[in-house]
Image (spheres, rainbow, N blue to C red):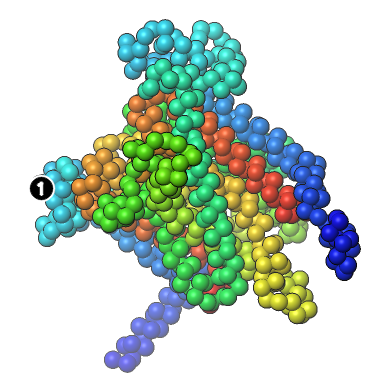
Amino acid sequence: MTENRAQSAGLLSGFWMSMPGWARSIIKNRKALTGLLILAFFFLVALLAPLLAPTAPQRMVGRPHDPPSEQYVFGTTRQGQDVFAQMVYGARGSLRVGFISGTVIIIIAVAVGLTAGFVGGATDEVLSLIANIFLVVGGLPLIIVMASMIERPGPDTVIIVLCLTSWAWGARVLRSQALSLRNSEFVEAARVSGEPTWRIIAVEILPNMTSLIVSAWIGSVLYAILVQAAYEFIGLGDPNSVTWGTILYWAQNNQALLTGAWWTFVPPGLAIAAVGLSLTLINYGIDEITNPRLSSS
Amino acid sequence: MTTAIGKPGAGKPADNPGFLSKLLDSVYAIFTSRFLRRRFMFYLVAAFAAITLNFIIPRLMPGDPVQLLFARFQGKLDPRAFEAIKAQFGFVDGPLFEQYLLYLRSIVTLDFGPSIMGFPVPVFQVISSSLRWTLLLAGIASVMSYLIGTFLGVLAAWRRGGRIDTVLLPIASVIGAFPYFFVALLAVYILGFQLDIFPTSHAYDTAIRQDWRSTEFIWSVVYHMMLPLFTIIVTATGGWMLGMRNNMIGVLSQDYIVMAEAKGLADRRIMLMYAARNAILPSLTAFAMSFGFIIAGLLLTEIVFSYPGMGYTFLLAVNARDYPLIQGIYLMITAAVLLANFIADMSYVLLDPRAR
């Protein structure tokens, strides 16, 4: 018995030691771990949606605006659809758009930020100017203008609109980091020893920016999820898709507030907030790991 | 100056400049700052970019832009009005550049054409009546959440591990992760419909005559503003708090803080005059940038509260596909954001002598 436990402890610690350093520090950080666990939960729900949902999300199964009961855990919508089924499938739609857009946004941001910071000169001036302009004239109003011009929004329209408008913030943050790394001694040394520019960027600069890129990526995913929800809540999204944003849109449209059908807008709102919180926590965790002075203990 | 001479021992006049000369110094600093001149040029370029984007976007969309924009209204509108709206957007026969110039001329003269929704009321008139509600809300909400958040952030950093740092900060951060409009929905549902404490829509009681000199009307405006303000302040404060706390922690480890402590200065003085004054500078730039986010959040909040500002009008315009109004609102919001940024830049110059 004891031997068994010792063995499993040995296995565990072996597993622990075999993990890369960054993974260990993330798991040891309470905030980052909490965030990761919440996020993993929603990912699991999204993956297993067909198994978890009792019925298809758009099917009318019950009476309109039935409060939560044993049969319909989260009640039904005005159209008599099962809110629980919608929530489970909505996790797919919301996470998919959030992570795809966030990833494309960060790829654009890295490309623009590194080029501007590393090449410098006129290239930097022009790229920075464009990024700064997008920071002040972009945002939700520009997104609404673009979306309102699209005649028939498909499920991926929001991704395209988000990626076109939202890369500037990340580009600016990454540019200033690239700029300070460019003038550091080890990059200078690499340049003197004749390394080609692409190698300096890929081998010397990028690894030193990993934590910043990861936190900018998480920030972009968070932004994408929040903006997507807002975008769909206004009614600009694809009305046939099931996401947390469109559930909220239908709740608002069906006077859920007035009729007291809280179960149609509280679950999607809380789910968006929980995913937002998990991403924020992961970012706080990364902040604390890279800058230990910030931790409150 | 006379008071300084009149009171013996009030210090040398140079150490104790009057309010007026301080004010003059500030005005001088604003006008001579190279930093501000550069920022001003930048905002001009940005405004130009927004105007140009507005011109390009409908033309980049697939299909014939004129068809796309105006097909819905053909037949519903008087043909002459239809031609007028098309001309407003530079959709005339002729090369693109000529269209662009025509479009620029109407923007510069603030002539956005008639709104389709409320034809024949000009877009500018529709916007100006809703703009003041949004600016009122956005102004109060952003300044208040910034001040409250920054102050709490200073306290959190000053008493590390204290109750503000370990209880209030996490709670504020959790609420900060909520989307604005969800907090708004909850506020309307709980405080409006269920408890019936606050009104759930409109900017004032429509039974009262709109008169800014009557206390009854102003009270009604304040009362209707409570919930939207509460929504934004509750959601936005957490971010400021954390930012300021982290800036403060960075500043508190500086040598001059240790020096100030060694000199035996009062704690409160070190906290406010030495640490907070320096820690606040980076967050001022963020404050300017946040105005855009506050406006975005406000657009949605207004929709939830049916508050007759830009956001609510924006929604109505989008639903009616009223393109002249949509574009006019976009330009107005952008102008407001640029102006707010410039004001924040000016206060930066006043607070940080290095920017002069």
Residue under the point 54% across and 63% down:
B242
Q: Residue at the far bottom: name it.
A: A2
Q: Quadrant of the N terminus of chain A?
A: bottom left
Q: Is residue B244 above or below residue A255?
A: below
- The percent position of residue A237, horizontal first and vertical second, equals 34, 37
Secondary element at tag 1:
loop
Residue B65's spot in the image, x, y percent? 43, 18
Neighbours of disc 1 within 10 Å: few (<14), some (14-19), many (20+): some
The chain holding disc 1 is A
Identity of the amino acid at label 1?
Gly
Q: Nearer the viewer, residue A182 or B272?
A: B272
Location of residue B126 by image quarter = top left
Q: Is residue A109 visible?
A: no
Q: How many numbered marks, from 0 up?
A: 1
Q: Nearer the viewer, residue B147 or A237?
A: B147
Q: Is residue A206 left or right of residue B273?
A: left
Residue that appears at 47% across and 69% down = B168
In this rendering, the answer to whether A40 lies above or below B22 is: below
Task: Between residue B292 and residue A108, name the one nearer to us.
Answer: B292
Closer to the camera in the image, A124 or B206: B206
Q: Is A11 left, or right, of B148 in this rendering? A: left
A13 is higher (above) or lower (below) than B192:
below
Q: In the rendered image, is residue B249 in sight? A: yes
Residue B81: x and y, percent? 42, 11
Instruction: Name the residue tied to disc 1.
Output: A62
Q: What residue is shown at x 45% (from left), y 18% (from top)?
A: B114
* Residue B3: quarter of image: bottom right
x, y percentage for residue B144?
53, 54
* Residue under the image location 37 percent in, 56 percent down: A273
